[in-house]
Every structure is written in C-alpha cells, then in structure tokens.
Amino acid sequence: MNFRYDIIVVGGGHAGCEAAYIAAVMGARTLLITMDMTKLAQMSCNPAMGGIAKGQIIREIDALGGMSAIVTDRAMIQFRMLNRSKGPAMWSPRAQCDRMLFSREWRKVLEATDNLSIWQEQASGLIVEEGKVKGVTTTLGTEFRSDAVILTNGTFLNGLMHVGFNTMPGGRSGDAESRGLSDQLRELGFGVERLKTGTSARIDGRSIDFEAMTEQKGDREGRCFSYVHDSVQIKDERSCYITHTNEKAHETLRKGLEFSPLFTGRIKGRGPRYCPSVEDKIVTFAGKESHQLFLEPEGWETNEYYINGFASSLKLETQIEALRQIRGLENVVIYRPGYAIEYDFFQPTQLKHSLETKRVENLFFAGQINGTTGYEEAGAQGLLAGINAVRKVRGEEPFILKRDEAYIGVLIDDLVTKGVDEPYRMFTSRAEFRILLRQDNADERLTPMAIKLGTATPERIARLENKVRMTEEIITFLKSYSISPSDINPFLREMRTAEITQKNKAVSLASRPQIELGVLLERISEAGRLEYNRSPLKREIVEAAEIRIKYAGYLEREKGVADKIKRLEDLKIPEEINYEELASISTEGRQKLSRIRPSTIGQATRITGVSSSDVSILIMYLGR
C-alpha cells in the first residue's frame, strides 16, 4: 500500500474537511486522517451555520471554492437573513441545519473528490526531520509520509469534559481525546496553553410546550448560501422557539454554583466572553432578571432540540431543575446534559499569515487549535491552510487575504498579529472595512482570486460573469432612462417620498432610501417603459445594483481609506531584522516585534504594545 501523499490533514471537523477538499481540488494527493468517519464536520454545538459576521465568512469560503455553503444549502431546515433592518454591510445569512444530514453530505463530498483519501485512526505524532515536517504516525504505528501536514484537531488535544465535579477525558461527548501531539509540539518549542468552551443540554421535543413560547419562522424566500444556487426552497421548514430564563431558574443556578467546576477553580482554561455559560451570565449580569433562550431543532427526523443560550457545566440535577422552572420547559426531558470542555491550543502568533508554523516548516495549523471558536472560523482557516500547503510544496508564493479583501483576512490577521486570550469569535465590528466586505459581494471580491488559484468551477465563473454583466446593465439603464412626473409621481406618493417637477433620471430615484429598486423596476415595466428587458431579474442581482447605487459615496470613501492604508500594509520588513539592535524602539515594542516578527509595517501597527513612535522608527530604519 502506498503511504505517500502530498498533503496530510489531521482532524475531520469543519477546518479539516475544507482543508482536505481544497487541497485535493488543487491537484494534490491528499489524505484526511480522522478518528471517526461517521462524524465528519460534526456540529458539536448548535445546529446552525452563519449569523452575524459568520454568514459573511461562509459566503467567502464559497466564493473561494470551498464547500461549507453548498453543504449548508443541502442540509438547511430554515434560513433567515439577519439584520435586514440595518445597512447591507450588516446583513448576515444564517441557516438552521439537519445536523446528521450535514455530516452525511460532507462525507459524500469528500468521498466523491478526486485525489482525496480518508483514513480512520488517531494521529499520535509528527515525523519531523531537520526542521521540516515529513509526515504523521498513528496509534497503530502506521507511518504516513507527506510534503506538508495540516493539524485541525479542534477540542480533542488532551480534551477534558466537566459536568459538575464529574470529569472525563474526551474531545466531545461520546468521543475520545487525542494524546501525544501536544507533548511533541511542546518539545519542538511550541507554547501550549488551555482554553475552555461549553455546550448546552439536548432536550426531547416531545416534552416541550411550544404553545407557551414564541415561534420564530424562517424567511421563506428561497434564499441560500452558495453563489452557485439560485434559490433553495425548503419543503418542510422547521421553526425555532424563543423563551426566557427567570428569577426562579437563576436562584436554582446560583445555589448550584458551589458544585461549579468553573467557579470553584477546577477549570483552568479561559472561556469565551461573547458566548458565556448560563452560570457566567447570572454572575456577570447579576441584576438582569431574564436571559433569552432559543430552542433550535437538530433535524427533520429527530425530536432533539438544542437550547441556545443555556450552555452549562453545572451538575446534572441543577441543570434539569433550572430548566423545569422556565416557561414551556416545565416537563422537559433531556437526552444529555450540557458540559464544559478544556483543551490544548497554540497561540496563533506562532504562525505566519499563510497559517504555516514558524518553528516547523511545512506544518500548518487551522481551526480551534489556533484559539478560535465557531464552525465558520474553523472552515475559513482550513480552506486557507489547504490552499497554502499546496502552494508551499509547489514552491509558490503564499495566498494571503488582506483586511480590506475579506473577513477571512481580518480573522487570520487578528490571530497571527494579536494572539488570543479567549476563544476568538468573528464580529462585524472587527472589520474596519465592513462596507466593502458584504455578504452579497463575496463572489465579486474573491471568485476572481479563486480562478487564479484553480479552485473555481466553470459554472461558478459563468455565474459571476453573468451577475457582473447584468448588474452593470441595470445601473447603465437607470442612468440613461428619464422618468416624467406624470408617470412616477403617483408611485412616489405611495412610497411617501418627494414628488418630482421635471424629468429625472431613474438612478436618482433609485438612490432614495424610501424606494426599493426591485419595486421601481416593476413600476417602470408596468408603464411599458422598461428598455432593460432581460428576464427574470434575479433578486441578488437587483440587490447588488441597489447597494452600489444607494451606498456609492460610502463605498468610494472606504475604498480610498483602504488604498491609503495599503501603502503601509505592503511595506515589507526583512525576516532577518534584529529588533534588539533598534535601541530607539521601546523595550516592550522590541520584545513584541521580536516574538511576533511581523512581515509588513501594516501588521506591526496592529500589534498590542507596539506604539506609533515605535512604528515610525521602524519605517525610518527601513529607509522610508
């Protein structure tokens, strides 16, 4: 049997699946090693993809040729576009998924991908020779050789789960932990730290009083995640339900804190501030009388529900008692309790922007191993690690996304430059150019890059070309077509916006906030004046044209700011520079620059502890 591959990916979670898939698509002979082939891309926490900022990341993965969006469209049981009441920079797609179907669809994708093999076993060590990774060894003593290795071990490295004072080793409920790799990496000089995350109890839907809760339905507009789909009509959409905790439940939780592994110091790892456990909430927000909970269905063919907002590591009895004091859950029956999990991770400042490690050549890290949380963040890292691993072994330049090009660029730059002191989660506020980085234009931003990388299918290329052409045609038509007051004023009165007294170009009316472009185009068509007669006008194309018209000034200004910043971003810093020789830089600045070793001045400006005067001195040293 041939045990020689170009790329080996360790771990079959969201990062590992994206990494293995894209590497194989790029033509590399790829091996994915996973401990359980039945749990590929398992949704270990809530059964949903996307959300605020995360939905933008999934669209970006899709635009670059990844599969998370396509698999989500195949498995989704509800779709919602969040933040529609705000500007388009904040619109964020989110889909509830059939958790079991999602994993099965990912397996279908991987097994149908040329150049990709799967091996079910635990990877226990790396083969490292002369500072380069050369392959992987497994618990059975099998040796696999490769030119590059991508580690995507999730929460499995020395994973330890907590329910009250009961602890058990494991990577997640029902799965064993992974041992050996952390110790070896520590011996190789990597800094190893601990983080903590957690999940909620899973409950039996037959024991829920849904009538006592608020139903939350999907958009039912046939929307979807992937740019290769026009729309996805969900035949049997499943609703989510909203309820709230109360003071009785809080009192029960407070009494249970004496058996909390979190508050008694048994858990050493730092937890996510933006997704706290319910016991964290009642302590941090002690004056708050209730907290919102979302009950999310796990799939079409199961009674299982996930309680979003009730992650807990309290003992089983406390969890059940508190849940039964919540409206609609008075008779709740649970399938399994919530738990906390501690696991090893590696500060991402030990990585290059390509996600290759600085200590061992051709070794890449992606996902929760880098201190992130979330399926979307993991998948994005896996995709970039897969692309860069292939490019590295081919002797090509790394593929680096900048902060004004993608949320993925923001994600990786934040990790590599700043490191983490808690599980990292993406928010729109982290992206300083979020008006440019919208979910609707990820294909226009990134698919041209995918074409150069060789990860875009002919269908994807054709769809992008059609979208760009039709969007331009709509805008050109609106700029050239004049509307008379008699034709349009009745419509303007309906829209409660100012009437016109003379002929106006249609584009000036389309720029008004009270007028939806799709409605305006329909009105022009009804009047028999629509010169643009291509049909149908797809919703996403009309929306793209509308955003460009209404937000033209903002887009132009933000692009100008981004271009100015790029001048610093592109100023390279030599790898061999000795910062200790630059005595004019502050001591903290020299220490941080020496440890992180930024590749550009732009990256140096974002390092905590490096002052603007430190950067100025560095620029002068570089002769600029």
Image (cartoon, rainbow, N blue to C red):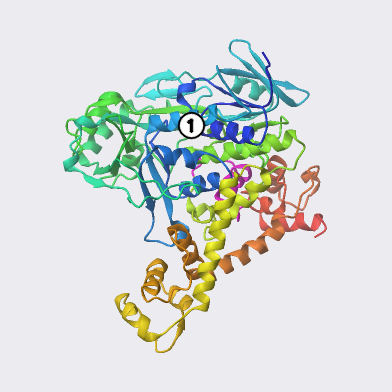
174 horizontally vs 294: left or right: right
Based on the picture, tell me whether residue 232 belongs to the magenta stretch: no
Based on the picture, tell me whether residue 404 belongs to the magenta stretch: yes
Q: Three-letter amino acid code at disc 1?
A: Trp
Identify the image quadrant of the C terminus: bottom right
Identify the image quadrant of the N terminus: top right
Measured as percent of width and height from the top left, residue 325 is found at 19, 35
Instruction: Establish if 482 lies above or below 121.
Output: below
Whether residue 422 is visible to the viewer of this picture, yes or no, is no
Residue that appears at 50% across and 70% down: 549
Measured as percent of width and height from the top left, residue 419 is found at 59, 41
In the image, the segment drawn in magenta is 403-425
Residue that appears at 68% across and 59% down: 566
Looking at this rendering, what residue extends furthest in the right direction?
623
Whether residue 49 is visible to the viewer of this picture, yes or no, is yes
Q: Quadrant of residue 249?
A: top left
Instruction: Establish if 238 lies above or below 137.
Output: below
Q: Quadrant of residue 28?
A: top right
37 horizontally vs 235: left or right: right
Residue that appears at 27% across and 47% down: 216
**Tag 1 secondary structure:** helix
Measured as percent of width and height from the top left, residue 431 is found at 54, 54
Measured as percent of width and height from the top left, residue 306 is found at 32, 34
Count the marks: how many?
Answer: 1
125 horizontally vs 208: left or right: right
Q: Nearer the viewer, residue 529 or 384?
A: 529
Q: Which residue is mark 1?
A: 106
Looking at this rendering, what residue extends furthest in the top direction?
140
Mark 1 is surrounded, within 10 Å at the Cα level, by few (under 14), some (14 to 19) or many (20 or more) other residues, namely many
Residue that appears at 40% across and 66% down: 518
